[in-house]
Every structure is written in C-alpha cells, then in structure tokens.
Image: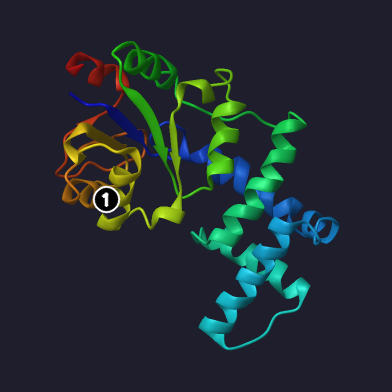
Amino acid sequence: MIKLFLFDIEGTTTDINFVHKVLFPYSAKCMQDYILHHQTHPLVVDAIQEVRDTVWKEEKRQLGLYEVIDKLQEWIKRDRKHRALKTIQGLIWDVGYSKNDFKGHVYPDTKPFFKTILEKGSKVGIYSSGSVHAQKLIFGYSIEGDLTPMISYYFDTNVGGKREVTSYQKITQEVGLRPEEIHFFSDIPEELVAAEAAGMGVTQLLRPGTKSSRFESITSFDTFKNYL
C-alpha cells in the first residue's frame, strides 16, 4: 500500500507558467525595494550573507548590498536553485499573496486527487525546489482555496537537490516509511530517476509542454485514481 504520495509542484500540481510568468517577475520587480526596507530582518540578513559567501566561493569577489540585489536578479533569470534566493522570493510572495495580487495556481485535478488520497487513508507530501514557505503560500492561497490542511509534509532543497538519490533517502527516513510505501510524481525525468533509485514508485506528469520519457506517465491525476 502506498502510504505517502509525494508531489513536485512546477509542471505537476501547478502550471509552470504561473511560476515563471507570475511569481518570478513579481519577485524581480519587488526585489530591490523589499531588501532595502527589510535588510535588518533576520531571514534577509542571513540570505544576504549566503549570497556573499556563494559569490566569494565561486567568483572570489566581495559584494555590496546593491551588488547582492543584482546577483539575486541574475539568479532569477537563470532560475538558479539557491537557498538565499528562494528565501527572499518566499518573503516577497508572502506580501503578494496577502495583498491578493495573485492566487496560487493548481491544476483542477489536484484537489480532488488529494481528497481521494486522504479518503484512502494515505498522506500527501510536497517536495519542491521552492522554499517550504513558498510551497505553503501556493497551496494556502490557491485558486481552489486553502489546501494546506490536506498536506502532511513539505520538503525543499534543505534535504538536498531534487536530482540526488540521497535527498529521497532522507525524505524516506524523515517520514519513517519504507521507500516502496512512497510514490513520487514529477514532470522531470531526472528527478524520477533519483526517486526510483531510492526505491520509490514514480510517475511522470505530462502536462502541456512536457516531453515523455521511459517512465510510466499520465496527463491527469484522474488517470492514477484508477490504481488506488
């Protein structure tokens, strides 16, 4: 029996265009003002230092505050999965959601599938490169309402990269299940390779624009319901 259904977000539960055409531009637009007005916030202080440490390690140069902001803007354009960027973006999006500037997109088959999973006695988990805070915002302020009560676990890159086998092994340990009791959904074959190598069941989501691979695939969670 599958006890935990683990979901990627971008391209799986959520249209990737929402992230790249709504969330990313919003964080880019607000980045400078947010950091300048919140530069003493503990999370912002830590993120700024992380950027400086990374640039010193990679480029051997020191950054002033405005150069840190420029580097974060560069990373947004490159979609770099850096913890400092994800932290700052999450804080900015928190403001956007609370002001009702946008709502989190979820595909129409997501909420019903979550509901079916819970009715069967299993649990729902999320594993995304976005921060846990950002994950909770997408589902908490979603177009389908607040879905966070349906979700038991959230994981981000603090457990490791999504293409690393050890990340899925850590998740398995944290939830206290055997890997075969977890099923992972993603649109990215490299992530499915890592999860499969860790012993999890995997399924690829073929949302619009996604290319098929060797993995079993579905175009909607409605199809997977037949296996439950």
Front-most of residues 39 and 19: 39
Front-most of residues 33 and 151: 151
Secondary element at image label 1: helix
Front-most of residues 178 and 187: 178
Q: Residue furthest front?
A: 176
Percent of width and height locating residue 53 = 59, 77
Percent of width and height locating residue 91 = 69, 47
Residue where numbered disc 1 is placed? 169
175 lies left or right of 56: left
Does any portion of residue 101 appear in the rendered image? no
Please tell me whether residue 192 is drawn above or below residue 80 in the rendered image. Answer: above
Residue drawn at x 47%, y 40% is 16
Q: Residue furthest bottom?
A: 60
**Res 44 quadrant in image:** bottom right
Please tell me whether residue 192 is drawn above or below residue 220 in the rendered image. Answer: below
Residue drawn at x 67%, y 84% is 62
Percent of width and height locating residue 129 = 46, 50
Residue drawn at x 53%, y 43% is 132
